[in-house]
Image (tube, rainbow, N blue to C red):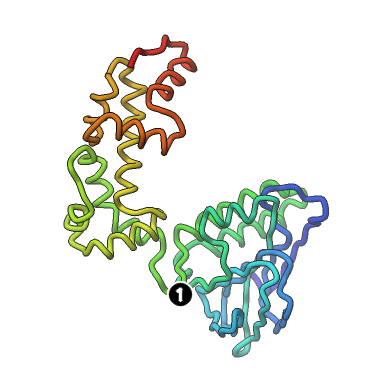
Amino acid sequence: MQNEKLRYTYSTIVDTFPLFVESIGYNPWEQDWSRPDGYPQYHWLQTIEGEGMFSFNGQEHRLSRGRGVLLKPYTPHEYITLGKKWSTVYVTFGGASVVSILDALTLNESTLYTDLEDQRFASILKGMLEKIKEDAEFSKLDLSSHLYDFLIHLRKHGKVNNQPSLSNNYDKLRPLVEWLEWAYAEDIGLNDMAAYLNVSSQYLNRLFHHTFSMSPYSFLIQLRIRKAKEILIQNADVPLKNIAFLVGFNDVSNFVATFKKIEGMTPKIYRQSYQHQSGRLPSEG
């Protein structure tokens, strides 16, 4: 990216997109800004070169290369250049569903992100800028798609205050998850799972909650129900009591109650619904 300042803005007055870009740009010579009332849209700012001091929520953060900040709308903030040159890339965004999207991705907080150097965060935004520059008719829908890709990448690989990213945590859990995919029907408890990874049960709980937003036991139950759904569809004549045993439940009543709680219907109704959609006759199971 050259030393040419780039900025593109889009009207949001009648925008009904679930997620839209309000502005996007590259500033090779970032200026000092003070916004005591914040900015009316979500705001991402990331350092490409040099360094700046970014202040929000009563704290100051050095925004050096490989660091970025995500701000919620109307978050008071200010930033100043440190040294001779500070280059940044940024995007501001909103949308009819932006709050629910960010809530679902657990990104809906004003947060400092670190260790972005080796990821493609900036390259996604640079790619959007280059595409806009090449094609004046580049649609807002395409921009929204790239923005969503950026947010997904931030959820997977972004490190908050130097803490491990979601992908780092999943790599730690991968051996256990692969084992559970094979051993889900066995009598497995929290201590068994912790022992498999050679970690404490408390640490395993924290790791699962941070990675999957659920406990290890809840993850196992979700896995058992998923396996039960596969059997219900693929083997229409297998009785429910047999399926319950095959996926690790001790009795059929507990299996049915758990299935209904998670799926919103009983296993029998789930099976009949699939058979109806596929044109098969309902099973008696």
Q: Which residue is mark 1?
A: 161
Q: Is residue 163 found left or right of 18 in the rendered image?
A: left
Q: Amino acid at mark 1?
A: Asn
Image coordinates for residue 101, horizontal then vertical, percent: 59, 52
Which residue in the rendered view is the most extreme toward the bottom? 83
x then y, percent, for residue 275:
43, 16
Depth check: 86 or 206 in front?
206
Relative side of 253 to 74, left or right: left
Which image quadrant: the C terminus? top left
State the residue lying farthest toward the top: 281
Q: Position of residue 260 (x, y in %)?
A: 41, 33
Location of the N terminus by quadrant is bottom right
Please give the name of the residue rendered at 67% of the width and 82% of the height, measured from the top-left corner.
78
Residue 204 percent coordinates (x, y):
28, 60
Vertical comparison of 273 with 68: above or below:
above
User: Looking at the image, which residue is at 24% across and 32% down?
Assistant: 251
| Total tally of numbered discs in the picture | 1
- Name the image quarter holding residue 281: top left
Q: Residue furthest front?
A: 253
Q: Residue at x 52, y 55 (%)?
A: 105
Near mark 1 (Cα within 10 A), the count class, few <14, some 14-19 or many ≥20, is few
Residue 166 falls in image quadrant? bottom left
Q: Quadrant of residue 271?
A: top left
Where is 1 relative to 86, above or below? above
From the viewer's perspective, tell me whether residue 11 is left or right of residue 155.
right
Is residue 61 shown above or below 201?
Answer: below
Q: Secondary structure at mark 1?
A: loop
